Amino acid sequence: MCSANIQPVFTTVPTFVSPCLPVTVLHKEYATAASMDCRSARRMCEHDLRSGLVDRGQLALRHTTIVEYWLQRCAMRQGGDMICSVPAATEQASQPRKDTQLLSTEDSGQNMRIGIVGCGGIGGRHLLSYQNNGHAPVALADAFPEAAAKAAEKWGGKPYGDWREMFTQEKLDAISVCTPPNVHREISEAALEAGIAVLCEKPMTTTLEDAEAIARAAESTGTLFFIGHCHRFQPQIQKLREIIDAGKLGAVRMFRTRIGFHFPRAENSWFTNADVSGGGILIDTHVHSVDIFRYLCGEVEEVTALTSTMDTPLGPAMRVEDSAIMTVRSTEGVLGVMEASWRTPPGEVQVKMYGTAARAVVNYQTLQLTVQRADEKEPSVVDVQDANRFDREIEHFLACVRGEQQPRLTPEDGVIAIRCLLAAYESKGVRVRVEAPSSLPVAVVPRDRRGSCVFCCVLDQPSCTVATVTEITRTGSRAWQDRGPRQRLLALGPTIRWR
């Protein structure tokens, strides 16, 4: 993406064509020096539409201003011809327009209008991170109006009981979607169509159809959609990626994550309502593990899963799985094991990588990254400057909204994660019960009153006082019948059940 320093010049000559908008001439009055790229140019155009400065029919006729490549030639290929234009500056403007908020001005960080949809636990985390990045929300929406009001009292902004009303009443630049995942699609599509950048919490959706629909909306509108896979912004994980890329682990062969803790709130909330959440801990938590695997090991080729819920001292069986194991294989042959549980205190979160030259471990409890080489007896701690991953994620998101950085996560990252998780759910339905081979019977080996095995005589144990042997077999195969008692016992091996 190209950018150029824009001089504070006012023009009324419609001469600019954006390479990111092949059929649209951007029309705005703009008189502020800044660095602008194609994304920001589009957002400025969309702001005018939302604020009523121009309508779509007038877009190609009024308020024309150069918003990119001020002093450079800009070209767009159309029908095989190269169309070029050079802006014509006509006069200096002492002040920028006051009826338009420009995200690219020097004080744009303070002027950016942020909205929050969903004021629960993760919504509060987003609000804190926006605050840590110097932003206060202008509006907050929650299906429970009292939740929005309570959040507004703490963080500021106007509360709404309906996000649709918030979109209508507020001129937002960006939102965080922090609702249950079954409504992510509806909210995200509406925001994208309105030109509002979206940071959507994980999981992206509960179905692949919904995830792909969001991706299409982001592509068709050209509006930023950012999926909240926050562990890519964990400093230790980023450092581990650098170590892998530098070859310090050798050839990476195996990967393991463990995310275990006690989550009592899940039992009586939407987390255990599959219609709302899409499932249990597999979709809610393994979404992180899948994305970390992709970030460190490459694309996923195969997945399988085992899931379970049961009555425990911590509570009755849940409506969804409370524990899950996924196994994955990358296209390069790296094998991964992912463990997660809502009912295994104390809390433990670790990421482990195994290579031909070394092993690396990220411990989220100690916030340490350690590496142990094959010739070392003890691991060494890698120096990593710690920072909060949510703060860094939102810092990057805001920079992308301003057009200063390219998104590290795309809608496709969210779609791929959902595709992997749903495939894992499908795989868990294929149950293979491990039993004794059909050629080997299951034997019940009784004992006499003194506790001696009735097979002692077969094993030449003279202490045995029982003269008969009781065998319960599954098969009457000739091969089995032809064996003698001793050979039958030795062949049974681990299939014997003692009683």
Image (cartoon, rainbow, N blue to C red):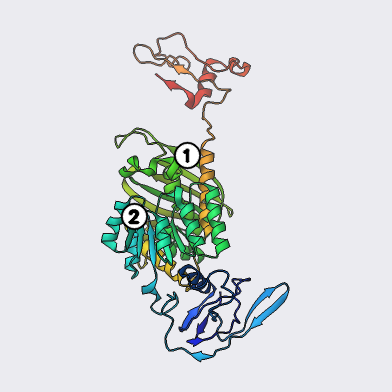
Question: Residue drawn at (43%, 51%), measured in percent from left and top?
Answer: 257
How packed is label 1: few (under 14 Cα within 10 Å), some, or many (20 or more)? some
Question: Residue drawn at (54%, 48%), measured in percent from left and top?
Answer: 208
- Numbered mark located on residue 119 in the image: 2
Label 2, label 1: how far apart the Cα atoms are: 33 Å
Q: Horizontal and vertical percent for residue 402?
A: 45, 72
Judged from the image, the secondary structure of the residue bearing numbered disc 2 is loop
Residue 48 visible in the snapshot:
yes
Name the image quarter holding the N terminus.
bottom right
Q: Could you tell which of marks 2 and 1 lies nearer the N-terminus?
A: 2
Camera-nearest label, 2 or 1 = 2
Between residues 62 and 312, which one lies in front from this camera angle? 62
Q: Horizontal and vertical percent for residue 76?
A: 65, 76
Q: Horizontal and vertical percent for residue 470?
A: 47, 12
Kindly identify the amino acid type of the residue bearing the numbered disc 2: Cys
- Numbered mark located on residue 129 in the image: none
Between residues 65 and 181, which one lies in front from this camera angle? 65
Where on the picture, by quarter, is residue 168? bottom left
- Numbered mark located on residue 306 in the image: 1
Residue lying furthest top in this view? 467
Judged from the image, the secondary structure of the residue bearing numbered disc 1 is strand
Where on the picture, by quarter, is residue 398? bottom left
Mark 2 touching mark 1, by CB under 8 A?
A: no
